[in-house]
Amino acid sequence: MTPEPAQTAPPTAPAIPAPATAPAPASADASLDAAAPVRLRPAIAAMIAYRQGKPAGEDDFKLSSNENPFDPLPSVLARIDQVRDVNRYPDAGATLLRTALAERFGVTVDHVHAGAGSVAILSQLITAAAGPGDEVLHAWRSFEAYPTLITVAGATGVPVPNLPDHSHDVDGMIRALTDRTRVVIVCTPNNPTGTLVSQADLERLLAAVPRDVLVLLDEAYGEFVDPEHALDGMRLLADHPNLVVLRTFSKAYGLAGLRIGYAVGHPRILDAARSAAIPLSVTGHAQHAALASLEHEDELLDRVAVLARDRDEAWRALTEQGWAVPRPHGNFVWLATGAETAEVEAQLAAVGLVVRAFGSEGIRVTIGEPASVRKLLNASAGIVRGLPEGHPARR
């Protein structure tokens, strides 16, 4: 045997005598504000962090985050309170929840994936399927996290402008497909415009997308859609193994603060998402709250029906006032305020309504407490009259 070479100890640095009095730093703030020499990915360094809906003051209504205004069901809170072993890691596979969802949709457990909100699963799937040189196709304006998730994955976003009625331009999306397309995202109801993709349009898009390209159907607001207009993405999974349907417990089920969502699709695709996920991100509290919500779903869907009724009444009232509002199918309405967006946002804030403004495009208003809807309609009548003739937000 050849003898191993002797290990050479690292050189010992000469001792440096400590000064009698250590000089105090000039300024802690100056030290923190100094430019860090760390090399960051230029695309990430240039990104603007996700902007959450503005918080509301004590006397304001927060209509900026599409949150469910109802308190959690007592049965859900009781189930959360039973989770005491927070000194232990949660079940990494969220097995109980996935099993319940698999039974509901008539699939095996490996066809279901759970994550810390459906946006986390979107990130995992985009990262798994697309990277540098690849393209991710999506409608725009749509969920504002899409461009960020695509950039983080290193891929290139291909936004396809919405039609004048604020819905997905499905024909435009089909024309935008290239041999570099790796992911296509469909958001229905579309956030923030509230419009739907029809069953026929989705099937037409799926027929045009190559079978090796991933299609993500984001149905975060699906429970708010009237049954007569509802899209059934689940029944398309058998014929389209490249399709994944994503849903969340944040909106209709009112668990936004617990961060829990799920996806249903082909096991090979979801295994890739599981591999890309941050381990142990679904907490035990979130899993058990979701399970309790499924067990008491009738009560929750009664609440959804109330919000959908209030949404439809608000839409009709806004239309009668002279607003051109696309037919809403989520728990929000879209005001295409354009160049007047900042002004209208300020007018609503002045009466205690905190809403979500999107640049110079428009404003999304969550349907919340009945008092907030009344306040919205009281303010909106005067606002629409103040918009110039021919404004896109006016009928």
Image (cartoon, rainbow, N blue to C red):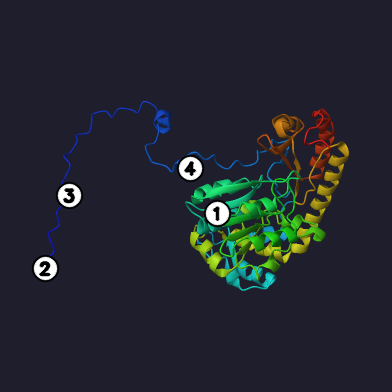
Which of 56 and 210 lies nearest the eye of the viewer? 210
Residues at circles 1 and 3 in contact by the CB criterion of under 8 Å: no
Amino acid residing under circle 2: Thr
Query: Which label sits in the foreground, 4 or 3?
Result: 4
Q: Which residue is mark 3?
A: 10
Label ID, residue 366: none
* C-alpha separation, residue under disc 2 versus residue under disc 1: 51 Å
> Where 283 sits versus 386, above or below?
below
Residue 81 shows up from this direction = no
Instruction: Pick the residue in front: 58 or 309.
Output: 309
Distance from Cα at disc 4 to Cα at disc 2: 51 Å
Which numbered disc, 2 or 1, marks the residue that appears first in the sequence?
Answer: 2
- The secondary structure type at the circle numbered 4 is helix
The part of the image, by quadrant, that contains residue 99 is bottom right
Residue at 49% in and 62% down: 275
Residue at 74%, 35% in the rendered image: 337
Question: Distance of mark 4 from mark 1, alpha carbons?
Answer: 16 Å
